[in-house]
Amino acid sequence: MTGSPTSPLAGIRVLDLSRMFPGAYCTSLLADLGADVLKVEAPNGGDGMRFLPGDFKASHVALNRGKRSMTLDLRTDGGPDVLRRLARDVDVVVESHRPGALDRLGVGFEALRADDAGLVWCSLTGFGPDGPMAEAPGHDMTYLGYSGLMSTLTVGGRPVVPGSTITLALAGLMGAFGIVAAINARHESGRGCRVDSAIVDAARWVVSDLVAMALNDQPQSWPEMPSRANYWCADGRWITCTASDPKSWATLVEAIDAPDLASPRMGIDDAKVAARLTAIFASAPAARWLENPGPAGGIGAVALPGDVVDDPQVDSRGSVVRLEGDGPLVLANPLRLDGASGEAATNARGPAPELGQHTDEALLAAGFSPDEVAALRDASVV
C-alpha cells in the first residue's frame, strides 16, 4: 500500500470477476481506498446488479461507482487466455464463482499464481470452497438462517426477514479485510495468498459470543426484557429502548414520569412493565422520546434508510457525497483514515460503468495490440 492517508490502496490493481452483492461490497471498499477496480463481465448481460427492479439501478450505482468495466466470455476458446494475460498486470483477483469453476477453465488461483507469485486471490463463496455444503446454492436468507444469525432476529419468537442483504455485505467486508492483510504480508514475503471469505462464516462471526456459549454449555441467547425492546409511537415511528443498566433505567423512568417502574422485578414483572411502557410511548411522537430521555435513557430511533437526508449527524460527518459532475448522491466510504472527511475518504467518485465501457482500454493496457483487440471482438470473446 503506497498511497496517501486517504487513498492507501492507490496503485493497487484489482481484477473483479465476481457477480452480484458480495463482490460488489468487497471491491467498492477497495475502490474507495484508492484501488483501480476493473470489473470483468459477461458480454451478454453482465453483472446481474445491472438488472435489478426499478428505473434507477441503485445497487449498481451505489456499489460499482468509480470502477471500470470490460466484457469477456470465459466460455469461448480464447477467453481463458485473455484472462491470464490480464491477470499478469494486477495485484488482486476477486471472484465469486462456484468452487472449482475457474480451475476447470484453467484460470484458477494456482494457474494464475504460476505466472505471478505475488497474486492475492479472494474467493467469495456461500459455504466455503470445501466441505459437504461447498457446492450448495444459497441466497442471503439461506446464509442468514444457516449461520444462526436469523434466530437472533425475532419478534414474538418468529424469525424476522430483514429488508437488506446483511450476510452478503459481511462477506464482502471480510474479503476486503483479508485482501488488505494479504497485501501487507506480501511486502515482507513477496508472495500472495488465497483469501477465503465464506458468507456463512462471516455471518456466524456476528454471533461469536452465542456460539461460545453453546460450545461451553452456557445459555445461548440474550434474555428478552421490556427494557431492551422496540416501541411504537404516536406518529407511527418506532424507537429502540435499551435501558438495561440501572443508570439509564433511572433516567428513563424519570423522563417518562413513571415512578412506579423505578424498581421492577425483572423476569417477574416483565409483562406489566412492557404493557406500561407500550402505553406511555404510544402517547407521544417518537421525537418526544428521542429528545427526552434520548440516548441517556436508552432511547434511539428506528431510522429509515432515507432518513439520512435530514440527519444532522450524517451532514456533520459528510456521510453522503455526490458522484462526479452532477451525479447521484451516495453514501460515503464508511472508513475514515487520518481524520479524512467523507468526501476525501471516498475515492470512487466516478459513475458506475456502462457494460464493457473500458474493454479496449483494459486490453491495450495489458499489451494486446489493436489488431488483437479487433480479432477478439470479431470472435465474440469480448
Image (spheres, rainbow, N blue to C red):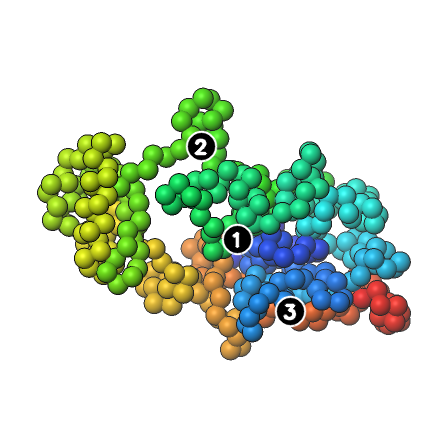
* Lower position in the chain sequence, tag 2 or tag 3: 2
- Disc 2: which residue: 209
Quarter of the image for residue 273 reads top left
**Of helix, strand and loop, which one carries label 2?**
helix
Q: Which of pointers 2 and 3 indicates the residue nearer the eye?
A: 2
**Of helix, strand and loop, which one carries label 1?**
loop
Q: Is residue 206 visible to the viewer in this orientation of the structure? A: no
Q: Disc 2 marks which amino acid? A: Asp
Separation of marks 2 and 3 at Cα, in angstroms? 41 Å
In the displayed structure, does residue 369 sit left or right of residue 201?
right
- Disc 1: which residue: 165
Q: Are the residues at dot 2 and dot 1 in contact (C-beta closer than 8 Å)?
A: no
Q: Which of pointers 3 and 1 indicates the residue nearer the eye?
A: 1
* Lower position in the chain sequence, tag 3 or tag 1: 1
Q: Position of residue 173 (x, y in %)?
A: 55, 48
Q: Position of residue 10 (x, y in %)?
A: 61, 57
Q: Position of residue 73 (x, y in %)?
A: 80, 61
In the displayed structure, does residue 56 sit left or right of residue 189?
left
* Lower position in the chain sequence, tag 2 or tag 1: 1
